[in-house]
Image: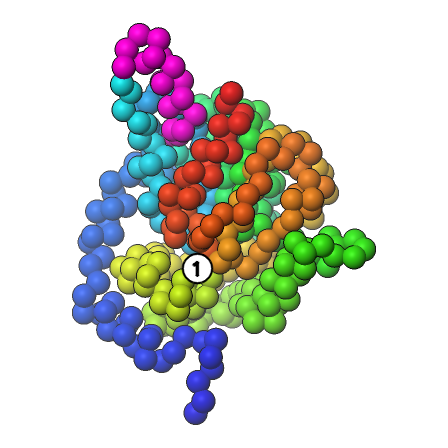
């Protein structure tokens, strides 16, 4: 039978499963996860798991990081150290104080929650956990942690949650940054499209034609899909591996971007927490269509291997205080995981502008 060119090849999946069965070390992942301070707190009736990793620099800026699907807190594994560890100060006197002031613009205390229904967070038992409600929960979380001045970042569903945080503008939130944020492209184009708008339209059409099937089924039948995925580790692996391969920026070999171990860490997190259906429900929840503009400072970064792009003028329609907009040189949907150096640079460049 002819192979489906856009599907996971049978031989590829077989190799991954053999490695999973014979060589993968779950204890290695446990050690990594346990190396980060990990907590749970109940907000609006749902247990929320989060990592709380403080910099040794006491005056670092708190940064809330939100993942998407099929992601987890593990998306940020490679940026924890560069975001929390300040450069070593040198010199003395006034020079040392000046350098410390610069360090404070580059270093963060990290709060990294698992979305409801994902990972070690609880599974909501009632409808209504859309990005707006999650944003309100995140605001409660930051208040409970005692942070009076903080920033937020997210990609994929994390970008939607972060945008809702921007609209909510809870006390203490001073700026947000997003990557992998989707727009209704045809709605945004007004008149003769520019080259940038044509680029966005092409990406949207390619996504709708070749990629959107998974979203449609998760949006309409998440529970039915879940029965199959939670009953089959191979099925769960294929469902997620396909996105790692298709949404990352590489030359045909996904292992040039992610190792087998890293991919299996995420697959195992979905499998062991039985979260195939509960994580898919975020698509089923009604996405907020809140038209309230975002007036706090906003940054946006666009990665060439992602499925989405928005010209600067579109962003300016919704974000009256757009302080950062950039197309970066490489990377895809899983920005922090794929290109940690670029991701960290974008975060620092964006939030530095509100710390002057």
Q: Which residue extends farthest front?
A: 195
Q: Position of residue 256 (x, y in %)?
A: 33, 61
Q: Going 47% across and 82% down the picture, which residue do you hit?
A: 4
Taking 266 as reference, is 51 above or below it?
above
> In the structure shown, which secondary structural element does the residue marked by tag 1 occupy?
loop
Instruction: Reply yes or no: does residue 93 show up in magenta.
Output: yes
For this view, does 138 lie left or right of residue 17? right
Q: Going 63% across and 64% down the picture, which residue do you hit?
A: 202
For this view, does 347 lie left or right of residue 318? left
Read off the residue under disc 1.
249
**Quick one: 340 or 72, which is closer to the camera?**
340
Magenta stretch in the rendered image: 91-109
Q: Quadrant of residue 22?
A: bottom left
Placement of the N terminus among the 4 image quadrants = bottom left
Instruction: Reply yes or no: does residue 107 show up in magenta.
Output: yes
Q: Going 21% across and 47% down the picture, which residue do you hit?
A: 31
Q: Which residue extends farthest right?
A: 191
Q: Position of residue 152 (x, y in %)?
A: 50, 35
Q: Quadrant of residue 71?
A: bottom left
Q: Report if residue 119 is visible in the image.
A: no
């Amino acid at each position: 039978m002819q192979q489906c060119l856009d599907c996971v090849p049978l031989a590829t999946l077989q190799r991954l499963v053999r490695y999973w069965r014979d060589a993968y070390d779950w204890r290695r992942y446990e050690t990594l996860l346990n190396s980060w301070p990990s907590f749970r707190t109940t907000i609006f009736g749902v247990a929320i798991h989060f990592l709380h990793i403080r910099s040794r620099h006491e005056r670092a800026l708190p940064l809330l990081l939100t993942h998407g699907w099929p992601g987890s807190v593990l998306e940020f594994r490679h940026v924890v150290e560069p975001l929390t560890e300040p450069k070593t100060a040198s010199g003395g006197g006034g020079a040392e104080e000046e350098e410390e002031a610069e360090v404070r613009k580059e270093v963060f205390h990290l709060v990294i929650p698992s979305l409801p229904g994902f990972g070690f967070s609880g599974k909501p038992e009632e409808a209504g956990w859309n990005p707006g409600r999650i944003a309100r929960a995140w605001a409660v979380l930051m208040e409970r942690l005692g942070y009076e001045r903080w920033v937020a970042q997210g990609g994929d569903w994390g970008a939607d949650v972060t945008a809702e945080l921007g609209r909510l503008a809870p006390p203490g939130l001073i700026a947000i940054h997003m990557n992998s944020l989707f727009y209704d492209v045809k709605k945004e184009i007004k008149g003769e499209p520019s080259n940038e708008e044509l680029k966005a339209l092409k990406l949207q059409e390619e996504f709708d034609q070749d990629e959107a099937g998974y979203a449609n089924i998760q949006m309409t039948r998440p529970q039915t899909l879940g029965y199959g995925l939670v009953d089959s580790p191979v099925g769960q692996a294929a469902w997620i591996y396909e996105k790692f391969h298709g949404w990352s920026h590489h030359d045909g070999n996904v292992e040039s971007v992610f190792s087998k171990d890293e991919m299996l860490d995420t697959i195992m997190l979905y499998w062991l927490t039985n979260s195939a259906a509960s994580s898919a429900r975020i698509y089923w929840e009604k996405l907020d269509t809140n038209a309230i503009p975002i007036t706090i400072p906003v940054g946006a970064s666009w990665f060439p291997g992602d499925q989405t792009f928005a010209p600067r003028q579109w962003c300016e329609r919704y974000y009256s205080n757009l302080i950062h907009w950039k197309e970066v040189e490489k990377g895809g949907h899983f920005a922090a995981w794929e290109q940690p150096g670029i991701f960290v640079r974008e975060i620092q460049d964006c939030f530095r502008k509100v710390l002057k």
